[in-house]
Structure formats: structure tokens, C-alpha cells
Image: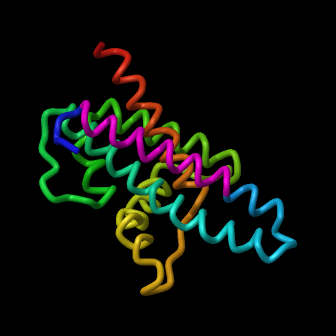
Amino acid sequence: MGKTYEEIRIGANTFATSTKILETVGQAGLQQASHDAGLGLLAQTMIPAITLKAFTCELALKAMVVKNGHSYGSVHKLDKLYENISDENKNKIVNAVVNEMKKSNASYGQSDFEKDLEEHSRLFIDWRYFFEKSVTANLPFINALFDIVLKRLEIEHKTTR
């Protein structure tokens, strides 16, 4: 994968598609959770799905960093990448995530977003090595961030064609 905006955007969409497939299989496992095979299927797909979801967020933010005229160097942390995207994208992302999170937590605000982003900044790194230490994630936050950064990429792509 290259380092141009378009190459990184395509990479993010590739991993997003794989994530969605894994989640679909995992949901099928969840529906059959009363069977041991269903639980195994769920565990075998949801951990990689969360890992790929985090990686997709990283790639999407990297594409936005490049689009904003910056270099991301060897940065992998979501919060540090977020700092280098355009103010417009920051505002759109934070507002959309906060609005989504308010559906389940009415008091969720920008400071909660910033805290969640910092706490999940190493999500890809931590979850790909889930077997080495205990890992947790705020899945509603990650799901919202995933959906919204992909949506922002799509909007940017449509406006630059």
C-alpha cells in the first residue's frame, strides 16, 4: 500500500469490507450461541473484526492527514492522527460521534469523545496482540468512529473527483 491519499483510502475501504464480512459471520455465531460451535465462531470472528475496525480507522485518519497536506510518519495512534486532520473533518467527526453516542448516553459530550479517542488510540496495536494481555474496548464508540471516518472519506472522495 502506498502513501498517497487515494492508495490509503482504498486500503481503508478494503479492510472495512473485510471487517463487515467478519461481523456478519460473528453475528451468525451469536445467533447460534446456544451451541458451542456458535460461541467459537463468534469469538473467532469478532476479535479480528475489532482489530480490523481499529486498523481501518487508522488508515482512514492517515488518508485524511495526507489529504490535509501533512505526513503521518510512523504514527499509529488514533488520537495523534486525529490531531493532524483538517479542522473541518475534526468537527464533523467529533459532532457525528457525539450525536451517535448520545443515543445510548444522553450526557456524552466532546470531552467524552476526546477521552475515548485517547483510551482507544492504540486499539489496533493492543487488539492484534489480544492473547498477550487482557484487552477491552468501548464498542459503541469504536463502531461510531469506524462508520463516521469511512463516511468522511467517502464524502471527500466524491468532492475531489
Comparing 25 with 99, the one in front is 25
**Does 18 appear in magenta?**
yes
Answer with the quarter of the image where residue 4 lies: top left
- Magenta extent: 6-25
Whole-percent x, y for residue 28 in the image: 75, 56
Residue pictured at 76% horizontal, 73% vertical? 37
Q: Quadrant of the C terminus?
A: top left
Q: Quadrant of the N terminus?
A: top left
Q: Residue furthest front?
A: 37
**Placement of 136 over or under 94, stated as above or below:** below
**Placement of 123 over or under 65, stated as above or below:** below
Q: Residue furthest right?
A: 34
Comparing 42 with 117, the one in front is 42
Comparing 77 with 127, the one in front is 127
Answer with the quarter of the image where residue 76 lies: bottom left
Q: Predominant secondary structure in magenta? A: helix
Whole-percent x, y for residue 75 in the image: 20, 58
Residue pictured at 41% horizontal, 71% vertical? 128
